Image: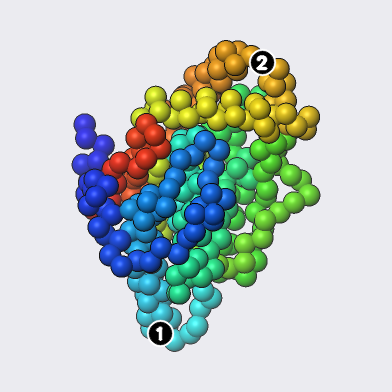
Amino acid sequence: MNPFKNYIAFNREKWAALRKKTPLLLSEEELENLKGINEKISLQDVEEIYLPLTRLINLKVKASQQLQGVTNSFLDYKARKTPYIIGIAGSVAVGKSTVARVLQTLLSRWENHKKVELVTTDGFLYPKETLERKGLMSRKGFPESYNTKKLIDFMIKVKSGKRKVEAPVYSHLTYDILPDQVEVIRNPDILIVEGINVLQVNKKHHVFASDFFDFSIYIDADEEYIKKWYIERFLILQKTAFQNPMSYFHRYTNLSKDEAIKRATEIWQDINAINLHDNILPTRRRANIVFKKGHDHRFEKVYLKRF
């Protein structure tokens, strides 16, 4: 069965042509600071992939703002500004965070939506203590490891136009929620919500995070490539972030390269691959647009949903 039957397919060249005259307002130095670990992205990628996307989103935001104005006129009152919300989904290690940061920066340089904020759903994981008590540490990232009610409450407040909404903050160093920190979202023009779970549905709930999205993006790649990127990232972190004694993964610093590859492969097979197949990949068909990467992180295909 063709998973993209309801999508218009573009190769890189045809998608790049949709940029039209959208200017490149990003420097090489800025792009370098936005890249994730072992992520490969160039200004050419920004021009050919991201600029057409920002043009499409800009048109959609304009239409949304106009519709909001028409509705307010009909009701004869001035409602609060409500953010245009974009969801970004995809596997662990596929490059979602880089996409989110680059997109945030580029969208903030359009005149009619300068205020663009970003939140990740990692902050809505249950604290480590709760996961340990429930026996869910090996299921971290699976649907049951998230405080879904807290995430939905957050989305409701943001979409209702509240001027200040707090989101919990997650530390990849300690592998836990930071209890004394919050991220404050201040009624932006656009809010980007990034996470492996943003397009998931759960039969136990009647409302999902994706119900609040105006537009959704799925970052896709063949599993063999994602697994390779995950292992490469693990090896880099072993020599960098894991060296910090505060790191949850500090115990892996003394592994040989072969041992580290073996351990990363086990984690991928026992946790991430299962989560990908059972919970993440099935949400791909719910995205408005799918970006497909090749073996070198280069975007090769774009699929835009017809309706």
Residue 62 visible, this angle: yes
Instruction: Classify 173 as above or below 258.
Output: below
Q: Secondary structure at mark 1?
A: helix
Horizontal and vertical percent for residue 70?
37, 80
Residue most toward the front?
Answer: 28
How many discs mark residues in the rendered view?
A: 2
What kind of residue is marked 2?
Leu
Q: How far is disc 1 from disc 2 in space, using C-alphas?
A: 65 Å
In percent of the image, x 39 and y 24: which residue is there? 224
* 166 horizontally vs 66: left or right: right
Q: Which quadrant: the N terminus? A: top left
Task: Out of 149 and 255, give the one closest to the viewer.
Answer: 255
In percent of the image, x 65 and y 26: which residue is there? 238
Instruction: Classify 28 as above or below 96.
Output: below
Residue 209 visible, this angle: no
What kind of residue is marked 1?
Ser
In percent of the image, x 58 and y 25: which residue is there? 235
In percent of the image, x 67 and y 56: which residue is there? 183
Horizontal and vertical percent for residue 50?
38, 54
Residue 269 image label = none
Q: Which residue is mark 1?
A: 73
Horizontal and vertical percent for residue 99?
46, 48
Residue 155, picture quadrant: bottom right
Instruction: Classify 157 as above or below 236.
Output: below
Q: Residues within 10 Å of mark 2 (few under 14, many from 20)?
A: few
* 13 horizontally vs 165: left or right: left
Residue 65, picture quadrant: bottom left
Q: Which residue is mark 2?
A: 255
Task: Out of 265 and 176, give the one closest to the viewer.
Answer: 265
Q: Residues within 10 Å of mark 1 (few under 14, many from 20)?
A: few
